[in-house]
Image (tube, rainbow, N blue to C red):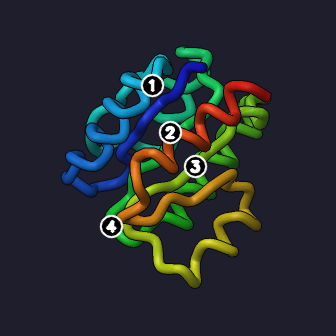
Amino acid sequence: MKVLIAKPGLDGHDRGAKVVAQALRDAGLEVVYTGLKRTPEEIVHAAIQEDVEVIGLSVLSGAHALLAQRVLEGLRAQGAGEIKVVVGGIVPPRDVEALAALGVARVFPMGTPLGDIVAAFKEWSRS
């Protein structure tokens, strides 16, 4: 499975994203990391160019719903709506249902054990 880990928006803290990326690599997944401060359009373009199956958005800024929506809309507009999008970071419990309604496949709030994140990705790689 090939995964894109992205830091959308103006959030400049990427330690968590890098930790998750390394855990996924250690579990045998191929991981592309976009770096900081990417636009949703850049993320969509990179995901399509890299032919990934999942995009992981790491958001600490509170703009998770807007950023996820823009990525999902961009994927659909480019005919790549089959790419799963997950969101991790600071996501209040009240926002999880709204993200799912947008089409986010899974939300990993801050503090989610790495093993749970890896297990979810491994499950998708088997399906």
Check disc 1 and report its element: helix, strand or loop. loop
Lower sequence index among marks 4 and 1: 1
Camera-near label (2 vs 3) is 2
Lower sequence index among marks 3 and 4: 4
Q: Nearer the viewer, residue 125 or 63?
A: 125
**Residue under circle 1?**
27
**Residue under circle 3?**
86
Q: Measure the C-alpha gap from mark 1 to mark 2.
A: 7 Å
**Which amino acid type is shown beneath numbered disc 4?**
Ser
**Residue under circle 2?**
118
Question: In the drawing, does residue 109 fall left or right of residue 119?
Answer: left
Check disc 3 and report its element: helix, strand or loop. strand
- Above or below, comparing residue 5 to residue 97 in the picture: above
Seen at 74% across and 30% down, the residue is: 80
**Which amino acid type is shown beneath numbered disc 2?**
Val
Image position, residue 21 (x, y; %)? 36, 33
Residue 61 - label: 4
Seen at 36% across and 40% down, the residue is: 20
- Above or below, comparing residue 115 to residue 109 in the picture: above
- Above or below, comparing residue 51 to residue 47 in the picture: above
Question: In the drawing, does residue 111 fall left or right of residue 66?
Answer: left
Lower sequence index among marks 1 and 2: 1
